[in-house]
Image: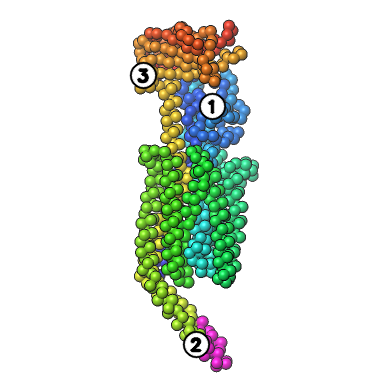
Amino acid sequence: MTQTIAPRVRTLVLLLLAACGLLLTTAGPASAHAALTGSDPQQGVVVDKAPDQVSLTFSEKVALSNDSLRVLDPKGKAVQQGKPFEVGGTTYGVKVHSGLPDGTYTVTYQVVSADSHPVAGAYTFSVGAPSTTSVSVSGDTAGGGVVGWLYGFGRYMSYAGFIVLVGGAAFVLGCWQRGAGVKPMQRLVVGGWLTLTSATLLLLLLRGSYTGSGKVGDIFDLDLLGNVLQTKAGAALVSRLLLLAAAALFISVLFGAYDKREDEEKRDLTFGLAIGGTVVAAGLAASWAMAEHASVGLQAAIAMPVDVVHLLAVATWLGGLTALLVALYRSDAPIESAAVRRFSQVAFGSVAALVATGVYQSWRQLGSWSAFTETRYGQLLLVKIGLVALLVGVAFVSRRWTAQLADTVVRQNKRAPQKERVAASASGSGKSKGGGSKRAAQLARQQAAMDTARQKRTRDADPNRFGLRRSVLAEAGVAVVLLAVTTVLTQTEPGRTEEDAKAAKAASSSSSSSSDSSGALTLDMSFDTGGTDGKGVVTVDFDPARVGGNEMHVYVQRPNGRAFDIPEVKVALTLEAKKIGPLAITPDRIATGHWSASNVQIPMAGDWKVAVTVRTSDIDQTTVSKNAQIG
């Protein structure tokens, strides 16, 4: 029966790994926590005068490099000058050359969000009138290509290594201490350590290219590696490597001196290993929590320790499950039903912690019920919840097989001493014959090996153990897919951020270039007349922004939002497509910083240029403009 199961196990594992690879390769570029919520000039706008700088606003703070913000002319030539800089808050800008000719310009950005994910994109605006451009923006993605795939694979393997290392060690120490002397169990935990260490080194090398050019040739660029070490993500990866050195010491004690100690000494060592192992495991979990989604956004001080507990619960459950699978399939030493029951209790506590922390994380990352179905993060989270529910259901079946296995193990343990006495008597009789002692010892070893093989066949043929092995194997298969979904989820923009970004973009678009539900139109334009105290913002309102008569209000404010008392404001409307205008409008002063004009006639619907002339002194004035669809 064992021979028929092994090929099925290998086939199932290969199919599961293929499914996980498919999930990772179809995940696409990493979506980030930060999202572009506004820009100046805005996307698609046509401005009358070339801007002095281009600024972008994100949903959270981002990290900049020298090439993070670029402005390209219609021929693809860069026209920005100097390094990008922080304008204020979450807004970042870059200066452009003065006197840009008319045409369509492309703005590209590549930044790193506060939760370590790259963010890239592009948009266009035009000066004077739109033109053809040779710049393609369709391929501007972050974290894609071969480097992006390798980085995703490295993340998956790092999670897998962490789960096997922590969960396997916890299984041995807390559930099956005899497993410390079992070779397959030792190889499992050491393999987890090697996997996590190798994956961490791979992520450290890939990080610079992953958040920058995306080129394979930049993976071994030492300058990029030096820059990575100065970032939050780089510091987290280095901290993980240092903690893995401590984990190596823990493993050497667990699988070295621990199994050779007497019971009383083993109890004391168990307590010390439990404390030290918990500290190291929590530190490894914190290396993710302090550099990714939990470290930014709402309630970060609470979210990070919650994330640590969540990761430890996942590792204890799924890693222990992997260790149990190895004990059932690969170990010659029979695992006691008591050890399986202890793991069942530990797994139940882990699932409880997983559910509690998962509910909090879901609320924090989604914020609304609609985000479950309307955002990619929410949809992936639903898949994860379904897989966890399936895993719990299969675990319930495993608990039933565990209870039925207890009597079988007791009977096997009763028969074992009898066989040992038979082997011992055979060895003793051989010694009494003098010259035949070597032959007798050889026969005794052969008999012991045959007995062990017979016990293993009997044990494997037991229907209760066979049922437990099948159910645990099914649990492990679901766990592999669950880990792949979780890896993709950690690289996906949280639903709350995605919805906030959509709302911010909609509000920005409504306030600048489109009418709201009442039909009013509002345009905001910054100005600088060049003189002393010459900066401010002028706002023009049209109501109902339709063909025919309109009410127009003009508000002038200082940069701090207070009303700006200036001597004169003029407005002119031009429909360049029909060669209408400019139609001059001189509004009446109503109050400080407020002018108004009634029955402003707009003869035709179209893309009107609204130019506002602001005079702040006898000699200092400027004209700013924006295009708006009216009618």
Front tag of 2 and 1: 2
Front tag of 1 and 3: 3
The vertical placement of 522 against 189, above or below, is above
For marks 2 and 3, give the CA distance: 102 Å
In the depicted view, which residue is nearer to us: 261 or 548? 261
Seen in the image, is 467 located left or right of residue 424?
left
Residue 452 x/y as whole percent: 46, 77
Residue 261 x/y as whole percent: 58, 70
Q: Is residue 84 magenta?
A: no
Q: Quadrant of the C terminus?
A: top left
Name the residue beneath numbered marker 1. 55
Name the residue beneath numbered marker 2. 425
Give the amino acid type for the residue marked by disc 1 in the picture: Ser
Numbered circles on residues, count: 3
Residue 558 x/y as whole percent: 54, 17
Label 1 vs 3, first from the N-terminus: 1
Give the amino acid type for the residue marked by disc 2 in the picture: Ser
Please name the residue shown 49% across and 50% down the image.
309
For the residue carrying disc 1, how many other residues have a C-alpha within 10 Å: few (<14), some (14-19), or many (20+)?
many
Please name the residue shown 48% across and 34% down the image.
35
In the depicted view, which residue is nearer to us: 414 or 467? 414
What range is drawn magenta here? Answer: 426-445
Q: Is mark 2 on a helix, strand or loop?
A: helix
Asked if disc 2 and disc 3 are in contact, CB closer than 8 Å, the reply is no
For the residue carrying disc 3, how many other residues have a C-alpha within 10 Å: few (<14), some (14-19), or many (20+)?
some
Name the residue beneath numbered marker 3. 519
